[in-house]
Amino acid sequence: MSAVWRGLTYCRQVACRIAFQNTTSVPCKQLESNLLNVQSSCLSVTSVRNKVYIPADKFENPSPFKPLGPSKHGFNPKLFDGGRLPRGLAEPLKNKKKYKPKNRWSRNRAMFGQNDCIDILGDHNIHPSELIKSPAWLRGFNGNEMQRLIRRLNTEGYKIKQLYPTQYHDMWKRIMYLYKKYNRKRGFKHR
Amino acid sequence: MMVLTNTLCVLPKQLRLGNILRFISTCSKKLNDGSYMATERPPLPIMTSRKIEFPNPYIAPKQAWLENLDTVNSEKLGIVDLHPDIFGVAPRIDMLHRNVKWQQLYKYINYDWEPTRAEVRGGGRKMWPQKKTGRHRAGSNRAPQWRGGGKAMAERGPYSKYYMLSEADRINGLCIALSVKYAQNDLHIVDSLEIPTDESEYLEELIDTRYWGFSALFVDDTDIMPENIALAASDIGQFNLMPVYGLNVYSILKHNTLVLTLAAVDKIEKKLLERLHSPFLHSSKKGKRPS
C-alpha cells in the first residue's frame, strides 16, 4: 500500500510543480484533484515510519528546495504502514467469539435475593440460612477445609464408608495431613 | 374524613380498607372499544391520613399519594402517612452496600474441586534412579509439575462464604432502601394489585404512561397474587411480583420502581417497627438463629 501512496505523492508533486511553473488561472488544488482524481479522505492517511507525505493544503506551493520525487526511492520497508490497526482485511476474523449479552432479567436473576430478610419480615419461624441451596452439611456453615471434611464425615461419613471406601480413606488422609499443616505452619487455617 | 378513617380502624379485618378496595376494583371491565370501564369508587379522597404506631415525636410523618392500578392513567385516591423512621431515614450507601454484599455472599457455594497428588491414583514408583541418568530427580509422576499429576493449592471441595449480617444492620438496610426509593419518587402506593385484564400490554402501557421506568416490583402482603397481574407480569422479566416476606434490599435496588399495596405498607411498617422497638433486637448481635 505504501508504494501506492508514494506513487500518488510523486504524481502530485510533479503536477504541482507543472502548475506552479505555468502559473495558469486554475488553482493548484483544483488541478491536482482533476489530474489524480483522489478523494480527500484517502489523502488524510499519514505514514509514520517513512515521512513521505505532506498534506496537500499545508503549503500553497511546494518547496523549491525539496528534491523532486519520493525520498528513499526503491526502498521497500516490508512492514505494514497503513495505520495503527491491521485494517483492510477482506473477511472478519472467524475465531472471534460473538458478543452475547446475558439476560439480566431472567427468572433467577430478576428474583435474586428473594426471602433474604424472611426472618425479619416473615413470621419469625424461618431463617434465611435454612433456604440456602447446598449440601446439608454445608448449609449455613463457613469453615476451613479440615472443618468442612470433619463436618461432612459426621453427617454422611457412615454412608461414604460403605459406598465409597476409597473416598473415605482419602478424606481421613487429608484430615490428618491438614491437622499437621495447620498446627505446624502458618497462614493456612483460614483458607 | 377523619370520622371515616376512625370507623374503618374499628372495623373487623375482613372489612378493612384494603379489602374493600380490592373488592371494588374487581368490578372494572373491558369495553368493546378497547377502553376500560371506570370503577365505582367511594367519594374521593378515600383517606387523608393513616394511623401510625410508635410515632416519632420529633419528625412529622412522610406523605405519599394513594394511587390505583385499574386505569392506565394514575388517579389520586388519597394521601397516606408513612412512618419517618422507615421511609425517611438518612441514605447511608455504605449500609446498602453491606446488605447487598451479604446477600451475594451468604448463599454462595463454590463446587470447584481438584485432586491433590495424594488423591491421584498411582505415582508410587520412582521414575528413574536418583543419579547417573542426567535427568531431574523425579520421585513420583503425580507431582504437580507432571502431566496427569495432582494440583497444588487447588480449590478443595464445595465451600461456602456464609456469614450472617447483624439483624440491626439488615433492618437498617431495609429502612434505608425504602427511604431512598421514597426520596427519589420511585415508591408508589396503590390500593390493590387488581388490573382489569391479563394482557401484558396493559401493564406496559400503564408503566410507560406513568413514567415508572424500565422495571417495577409489585409487593403485596399475601403470596397469592391477583390472577390478572400475575399473568400479565409473567411474560415480562422486568415486572415482578413479591410478597412482603420476600422483600429485600437487592430487589428494591434492582428494580426502578417499587409498588407497594396499602396492606403491604401496613405489614412492612408493623414488622420493622416491632423489631426496631424490641428489647431483644441487639441481644443476638450476629443475627444468628435462636436455638
Image: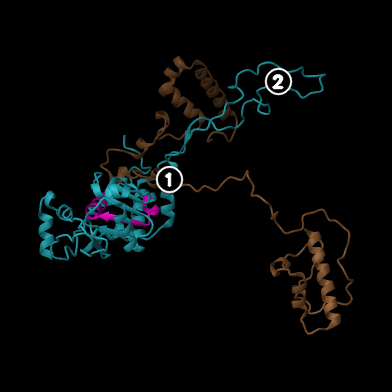
Does B188 appear in magenta?
no
Asked whether, in this view, residue B84 is left or right of residue A190, the answer is: left
- In the image, is residue A130 above or below residue B97? above
- In the image, is residue B33 above or below residue A39? above
Q: Amino acid at mark 1?
A: Trp
Q: Quadrant location of residue B137?
A: top right
At x 48%, y 17%, the residue is A164
User: Is residue B198 visible from the viewing direction of this image?
Assistant: yes
Element under disc 1: helix
At x 12%, y 60%, the residue is B6
Residue in the foreground of this view, choosing between B60 and B58 = B60
Asked whether, in this view, residue B106 is left or right of residue A119, the answer is: right
Mark 2 lies on residue? B139
**Distance CA(mark 2)–CA(mark 1):** 46 Å
Q: Quadrant location of residue B52?
A: bottom left
Residue in the foreground of this view, choosing between B166 and B131 = B131
Image disc number at residue B102: 1
Q: Which chain is cyan?
A: B
Q: Amino acid at mark 2?
A: Gly
Asked whether, in this view, residue A104 is left or right of residue B192, the answer is: right
The residue range painted magenta reads: B251-271
